[in-house]
Amino acid sequence: MSVTWDGGAPVIVDQRLLPGEVVHRRLTDAAETIEAIRTLAVRGAPAIGIAGAYGLVAALDAAGLASSSGDTLRALVGDLADRIAAARPTAVNLAHDVGRVREAALAAADRGPAAVREAALTEALAIHAADRASCAAIAHHGRMALAGRRRILTHCNTGRLATGGDGTALAVVYALHAAGELDEVLACEARPLLQGGRLTAWELVMAGVPSRVIVDGAAGAAMAAGLVEAVIVGADRIAANGDTANKIGTYALAVLARHHGIPFWVAAPWSTVDPATPDGAAIVVEERDPAEVFGYRDVRWSPAGAGAWNPAFDVTPAELITGIVTDRGTLVAPYGPGIARHARGAEDA
Amino acid sequence: MSVTWDGGAPVIVDQRLLPGEVVHRRLTDAAETIEAIRTLAVRGAPAIGIAGAYGLVAALDAAGLASSSGDTLRALVGDLADRIAAARPTAVNLAHDVGRVREAALAAADRGPAAVREAALTEALAIHAADRASCAAIAHHGRMALAGRRRILTHCNTGRLATGGDGTALAVVYALHAAGELDEVLACEARPLLQGGRLTAWELVMAGVPSRVIVDGAAGAAMAAGLVEAVIVGADRIAANGDTANKIGTYALAVLARHHGIPFWVAAPWSTVDPATPDGAAIVVEERDPAEVFGYRDVRWSPAGAGAWNPAFDVTPAELITGIVTDRGTLVAPYGPGIARHARGAEDA
């Protein structure tokens, strides 16, 4: 739903405008892809990766691939891939998926521009198909992990708009609902960009899932009031020891869940795990424009002269995480050995 | 600044419009006072109490006091006072201050309508003067309580706009700043009505106090990043055991502060303490219009069909509170005996 390939370019739903307007945009070159990723027109770690992968294919077309060969071709692929991969530094999926398309393209470079283009597109389509399968696997494992928990709190948007399939954390919610195992989801609105209040609320209304939106500050009160039996969130990056970077506000939810004895789950595709990042301290959190805090879209409510601290993400330490649901199975503490085992390619149910 | 008496009626700054527009409104009868309190045109527990007290005087004038006497006069005073006091059920100051004006008016009823009006106004002016003195005392005690803590986090608005003086929690911040003992205040924006991002940010910019606004979800990350050495918040009602009702999001800040070993202070005038409320479980938290969660003012970003849970306040249990700064001195745990002693009229420095 979030990203499709129309035969010549990726097409996204501009998520900055949802739910008020449903506007589709074609990303026909590197600049348009980078702009869409940077401005959060496309968002959600897996969706960003897929958009970047398809976007590299379109960027190769736009750059006039046919007139290049050999080292020039290789340099072109490398340059475009580097630029797209840098559009959002915290998003490990983006670098990973763009890197896969780049490698496939480079491996075909000796066979000429047409082969490069075909190899790149084949790889991008495979990345998208794998993400759909990954969402389904996460939904399956997550439903088992949350068995018996009928009141779920989630954060930001991790659903059909954030991925190439049903989502990550929200795919688990969809699976619980489909099985008749869900009473209600509370969706934190996720200021400043309100992906929960806008996008998750929209997805859940569309899908007929019982849900209510809360302001982020109400999560603690909701737990104290008995409205939450489990928390499940997505991840932007998971370090080798299980420390997890995710949307600002996630860390506070983990601390609150621990205080109330409520399980706190992370759900993410394996591609979000970065064994090369030893722990949370090694994750660089991007700080975004303070203007995001001063208002929303065209409305500004803070005074002239005000300052803001606006980190896009925070890092939840592994010791606050009950378990990590991935498409390769569910990990529990200690995360280091499990992550290392999966990273070597072992798979368990 | 928040409420003044212009000789014939209370005048408020309409806080729903700040900081974009500075609009003053005269509250010339009971309906206008009730509407201003209910819609948060005037807000902050002490300011609400003062507005209600002045508003009762104006309401008596508007109701045609001069033509009444005896039991009719008494019934009129009682009815108007009841209606104004009920405008915001969680706000104990409102009931308390309106009750004081009512008692003063009733005590003068046998001397006729002019005496009733004079007694009511005298009492309302005394309530306002006492609040100014109360703010100054809180600032003094709070500055001592927070000595050495140079990075302060606060929530909502508890300053000059919320009181008849310099504020409660924010008065402590002003005092620290005036003494050169403050590096920075972080102001949580306080969704849904954004009293932090709008009003506290505005006050602090006006006063030249170094400050940054954060979204409510960033408070945990700010603590983890070392940006917070103490939290200080106001109170809407403090129960006999120290449990404190305050703006939604306060409880989460208290849990986060405890997790990080950061002191969590409440600052409030003694009038906020309600010895008749045994503990937090006895406090009825008002739920406000879900539409507040779906957007802000004229902007709506949540989809049609969405639901919301929108409690105005939450309750922080006494065991998470480092101390309570009042105009009668600073209380620490166990709060019950200290509150009972002060309630009997004892005062300490």
Image (cartoon, coloured by chain):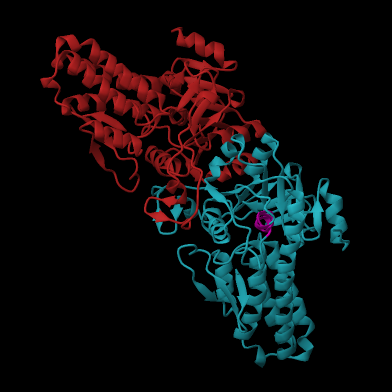
Chain colours: A red, B cyan
Q: Is residue B312 shown above or below B67? A: above
Residue B77: where, in percent of width, then height? 69, 80
Q: Is residue A331 shown above or below A297? A: above
**Residue A146 in sight:** no
Give the quarter of the image for residue B157: bottom right
Q: Is residue A106 shown above or below B258? A: above
Q: Residue at x 54, y 26 (%)?
A: A265
Q: Residue at x 42, y 55 (%)?
A: A300
Residue B127: where, in percent of width, then height? 73, 72
Give the quarter of the image for residue B120: bottom right
Q: Residue furthest left?
A: A67
Tell me if residue A77 is in the magenta stretch: no
Relative to A62, A98 lies left or right: right
Report the span colored magenta.
B168-178
Q: Is residue A278 shown above or below A3? A: above
Main secondary structure along the magenta-highlighted residues = helix
**Residue B215 in sight:** yes
Q: Residue furthest bottom?
A: B67
Residue B197: where, in percent of width, then height? 52, 53
